Each structure stands twice: as C-alpha cells, then as structure tokens.
Amino acid sequence: MNIQQENIKKLVERRASARLGGGEKRIEAQHAKGKKTARERLAMLLDEGSFEEFDMFVQHRCTNFGMEKQHIDGDGVVTGCGTIDGRLVYVFAQDFTVSGGSLSKTMSEKICKVMDMAMRNGAPCIGLNDSGGARIQEGIDALAGYAEIFERNILASGVIPQISGIFGPCAGGAVYSPALTDFTLMVKNTSYMFLTGPAVVKSVTGEDVSQEELGGAGVHASKSGVAHFAAESEEDGIAKIKELLSFLPQNNREEAPLKPTSDPYNRVDAALNEIIPDNPNKPYDMYAVVRSIVDDGHFFEVHKEYAKNIIVGFARMNGRSVGVVANQPAMLAGVLDINASRKASRFVRFCDAFNIPLVTLVDVPGFLPGTHQEYGAIITNGAKLLYAYGEATVPKVTVTLRKSYGGAHIVMSCKQLRGDINYAWPSANIAVMGADGAVNVLYAKDMKAAATPDEAKAIFEDKKKEYDDLFSNPYQAAQKGYIDDVIEPANTRFRVIRALEQLSAKRQDLPAKKHDNLPL
Ligand code: HXC
C-alpha cells in the first residue's frame, strides 16, 4: 500500500468510526428505548443519496472533568444539507449516543454553520432534537452556544422556514430554540420538553408529575400548544415534516411550489347548500366544508388537538398552497378564546411571512366571556389575531358561512382589515350580536314594563323578527359593500379559486418601521 492508499484507508476508517457516534453499545441502548439514531433519522428525512455532511471531524475542546480523554469525531450532532422531494434543506440531528446529545460549544458552532448556510442560500432549516441539554462539563461555553443558536433562530424567523422535530429529551433552556422556530413536532412517548424536570418540580412546588404528564407530546400538542404536531412514531414524524415542507416556499422571497391536481377548479358540491342547519344554535362540522373546497379533499392540519374551536392548516386550491383558518361551530360553538386567538394569529403571521394566501371561513358567535378569559388577557390575545390579519399583505379571501358577530366579525379577516375578497353565504348573519341578545339589551325595559308575560313575549318575538329581517342575513352587509358578493355555497371552491387567481400578483406594502409592536 502506498502513502496515498494509506491516507485514503485512514479517511475511510475515520469516517466509519465517526458514523458510529458513541459506539455500538450506545446505539443499541438508543434502539432499546424505541428511538432511532441521528443518522437513521436523516436517512429517512432526506432523498436517498442527497446528504452532504459537514464537520464530520469536529471535536469538542473541553478539558474539564476528564473530557480531554473523550473525543468523538462529529461531537454529538450530525449536520449538513440534502434534498427533500428534490428541494434543498439544511439539517442538524443531535446524536444522543455522544454525551447524551448534550450541547458543547463546538456542537453549537456546527449547528450555527448550517443555519448560516440555510440563510445565505435561502433554504429551510430542520433541526432534530434529542439532547440532555447544555454539556455540563463545559459550563458557560455551552450556554454561549445556545445563545448563538437562538440569535440565529431569531434572525432567520420570517426569512426561511424553520422546523424543529423533538425526538427525545429537550429540557431546560434548550426548549427555546424550538420555541423560536416556526413549527415544532414531537414524537409521542419518546420525546418531552420542559424547562425543569419532574424532580425540580417536586422540590419547588411539591407537585408529583411524570415526564410524560409534564412535557410529553400529548400535553404540548393539546394543552400548551408548544407542539404543532404530535407524531405516532419517528417514521410518522419524519413523514409529517416532509409533508409540511411541501406546502412551503424555500424562503420569504419565493412562492410555495405548485402541485397540479386533477380536481376540477369549478367542482360544485351540492352538499354545501344543505350543510347549515335551520336552527342557528345547531352545530355542523367545519371540516366538511374545508375538505369540500380544497384540492382532493386534502387538508394538512396544524395544531389539530389544540384550541379545537378554530381550525388552521395548509391545503391547496387549484394546485396553489393556501393557509386555511376556520371557526369550528362543532366545538364551543366556534367561539374565539385566548388559545384560539393565539393559535390562529401565529398561523396567519407564518402564512403572511411566507407568501401563502389565506382563506378564512367564518362562523363565529363572538369572544368567550368570563373572568377566566379576562384575567388571562383575552383583550391582548384577541388583539393578536386582529393584528395578524390587519398587517397581513398576502391575498386574503374570506367566506362568511353563518354567524359573524361583534368584535369577532372584525377579527376574522373582515373587509376593513384589508380582506381582499369577502364573500358570504345566504345563511350569513353579520351583526353586532345575535337576535336574542340584541332584543334583550334593546327592549329589556319594555319587556319588564309589560302587563303580562305573554305581552313581554310578544314584544320579544316582534322585535326579534324585526332584527332578524334586518341583520340575520348577509344583505345589509352586501348593500353597504362590506362583503363583495353573496354566493351559493355549492360554488364556494370555484369562487375562492377564482378570487385567488385574481389576487395572485397582489402587492401591498406596510409603512416603513423598525419593526411592529404587536400585542404580545
Ligand atoms: C453532559 C450528559 C448530559 C449533559 C446526559 N449526558 N446529559 N453529559 N451534559 N447535559 C450524558 C450522561 O452522562 C450519559 O453519559 C449519557 O449522556 C446518556 O445519559 P443517561 O443519563 O445515561 O441517559 P438517560 O437515562 O436516557 O437520561 C437522559 C436525560 C439525563 C434525562 C437527558 O441524562 C439527564 O437528566 N441529563 C441532564 C439533563 C440536564 O439537566 N441538562 C441541563 C439542562 S439546563 P455516559 O457516558 O454515562 O453514557 C440546560 C441549560 C440550557 O440545558 C440553557 C440554554 C439557554
């Protein structure tokens, strides 16, 4: 063997050793926990043969606690770029087999390098987290590393899509990187996120709580809203990340890719003409409307288990990505509350940042009343959604199906919040409030002064009819141009697609400013 052959042999051996991370035993331990390794995850995520790895030979520089004797090429994170469905992405996957995937300064430098490249080259950045947090032996160096990642998360926000997959522990301050990204996905049963673990919780508050109850995928997908998606398995998680990306552009200067469909753009669905019940207090399922109007009935939902009174997610209309926001009358009558407002406002802002048009389906009886909501700042939280719609410059098409009352009417992408095209079904009621509430406010004194209960009832019925005739239909709003047209429900898909086509070259600017001061 000549020197060059020796050199190449060494390279091949060193690569093979780096690929083993913490070694066979730790890989077995990882598998025994029902988890895959960082490399196995990337192999599932990226198109076959597309992975270009960086910094495979990077090692930590720590000399505390005997660390100078423990060097593993790559140091606990696998980084690089590759393609998903042929589109460039930058990736990092923490390797739990090396010091529990804990973050060293060099590891943060590897992560920052791919984040910088993603920004420069205008491609999404996907992080797969599986880490014991800051590398304890490194002290402040590890904390500095986190801060450098966070800074990049912030600068990249609204420029490139950032997606976090949580595939194992993600604890302490480490949770803030996923929280700064656009979407967080957790894998059920094997991942958890919390600022302080069960032992610290017990010592500070006395509360007995398991890891799963404190910060498992179920909790964050349904209670806190920290996770946008809860995956059944790692495979499911990777599939969801890939599908999510298919709806997104590469960066804020591009449009999402078109996906041609054989679903006719002018498909009529007669079932929609029958979907609104005669009784205004009876619910119906908004999912049926969403699926009816989007391409192939396919809806990729975000935050499915959280604040179910509002539905948000991605779909395509005539091949074009859209963000759908819809009140859900089948859950709490579709009322807007704190969680629904937070959920929808974040989604609206994401779509606006990444040039994804918004289709809003309205059936909202108002904001949820009560001390719980007021003490929790429904005023500020509701204002977030109002703000998000009001500042959004992407095409906005709104369809009012039934109720659209009061402040909630304004919030849900009304014309004066620069809704571009606002349609209403003939069943729409656009008013300050519902008829019963209105009559009770306006005629309380008259009803109280009535000689008999029957007389009071007659006053109520009479005024209710007057109110219904005036407001319980879309025509007062249509007469004043507050909506652009009253449409037959069956034609909704066609009308929304035609409106989106019309708006496809829309350009609208915001006044120059350093940044906004949205009500946080
Ligand atoms: C160094 C760590 C480590 C860490 C784990 N390891 N976490 N090494 N720094 N933070 C090492 C372990 O020593 C062990 O090494 C290997 O990784 C695997 O860990 P195990 O404990 O054997 O695994 P498991 O039983 O699955 O438990 C995983 C774990 C536990 C729950 C994550 O390791 C743990 O509690 N780690 C500490 C978590 C923590 O408190 N981190 C700091 C959070 S504060 P060997 O060699 O034995 O295999 C923080 C601040 C960030 O992160 C601030 C940002 C602003």
Image (spheres, grey):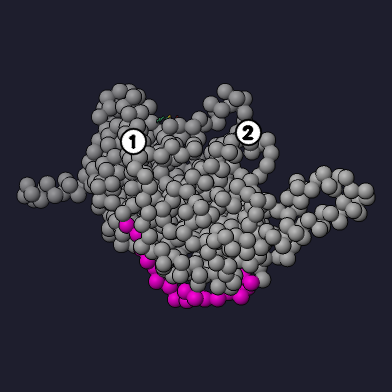
Q: How many marks?
A: 2
Q: Where does the image place residue 424, in percent across and percent down from the top left?
A: 58, 64
Q: Amino acid at mark 2?
A: Tyr
Depth order, front residue of 195/160: 160
Residue at 38% from the left image edge and 60% from the top image edge: 506
Q: Is residue 438 left or right of residue 41?
A: right
- Identified at 63% across, 61% down, the residue is 476
The label number, if any, that marks residue 375 in the structure image: 2
Question: Residue 10 or 314: which is nearer the viewer?
Answer: 314
Q: Secondary structure at mark 2?
A: helix
The residue closer to the viewer here, 440 or 251, is 440
Q: Secondary structure at mark 1?
A: helix
Residue 438 located left or right of residue 49: right
Could one spot residue 161 in this view of the protein?
no
Q: Tell me, yes or no, whether the highlighted magenta stretch contains residue 232.
A: no
The segment highlighted magenta reads 254-273
Q: Position of residue 38 (x, y in %)?
A: 36, 47
Q: Say left or right for 160 vs 227.
A: left
User: Where's residue 295, x and y in %?
Assistant: 48, 69
Q: Please identify the residue farthest to the left as the structure is shown.
A: 2
Residue at coordinates 60% horizontally, 35% vertically from top-left?
Answer: 376
Q: Are marks 2 and 1 in contact (CB under 8 Å)?
A: no
Please name the amino acid that badge 1 sits on.
Glu
